[in-house]
Amino acid sequence: MELKTIENKYDDVDYKIKIISPEFTCLCPGKPDQPDFATISITYVPDAYLIELKSLKYYLGGYRNKEIYHETVTNKIKEDLVEKLEPRYIKVRGDWNVRGGITTIVEIEHKKEDWNKDPKDIEIRSTEHTSTSR
């Protein structure tokens, strides 16, 4: 599924968006009978475009039957989002479930060269909603 964007009607304001996908899956390379599970978190400061969430859902679901390493898929997600959104800032984090007694966390960031702000100064103030289902 192709990632789709929508116009950011507030592109004159720096604000942060956080998207969490707690049920991401792909397959372990060389062992396709062993799925890998992760929570993928995407945090970004948009510029002209926002990600259309339904397309993101299908895009992430497209990895379900792909054999791919944790580091590769996390970086690929970031690359694809940067290409489509051209965000001021983006961070993609993969929190991978334990495999063989080891937990892997992969985190990658990108910042537009002409954006001179610190993304830490833009806060998401409320974290009261922690439900992963409706």
Image (cartoon, helix red, strand yellow):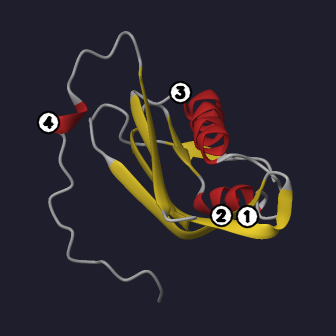
Q: Are marks 1 and 2 in contact (CB under 8 Å)?
A: yes
- Real-space CA distance between mark 3 and mark 2, rounded to the nearest whole angstrom: 19 Å
Q: Nearer the viewer, mark 3 or mark 4?
A: 4
- Real-space CA distance between mark 1 and mark 2, rounded to the nearest whole angstrom: 6 Å
- Depth check, front residue: 116 or 103: 103
Crowding at dot 4, Cα within 10 Å, few <14 / some 14-19 / many 20+, comes out as few
Q: Do the residues labelled 3 and 4 touch (CB within 8 Å)?
A: no
| Sooner in the amino-acid sequence: mark 4 or mark 1 | 1
| Sooner in the amino-acid sequence: mark 2 or mark 4 | 2
Q: Do the residues labelled 2 and 4 touch (CB within 8 Å)?
A: no
**Which quadrant of the figure contains the N terminus?**
bottom right
- Residue under label 4: 121
- Residue under label 3: 86
- Depth check, front residue: 9 or 2: 2
Residue 16: percent from left, percent from top:
30, 46
- Residue under label 1: 61
Q: Which of marks 1 and 2 is in front?
A: 1
- Residue under label 2: 57
Crowding at dot 1, Cα within 10 Å, few <14 / some 14-19 / many 20+, comes out as some
Amino acid type, residue under disc 2 in the picture: Lys
- Real-space CA distance between mark 2 and mark 4, rounded to the nearest whole angstrom: 28 Å
Q: What residue is shown at x 28% (from left), y 78% (from top)?
A: 129
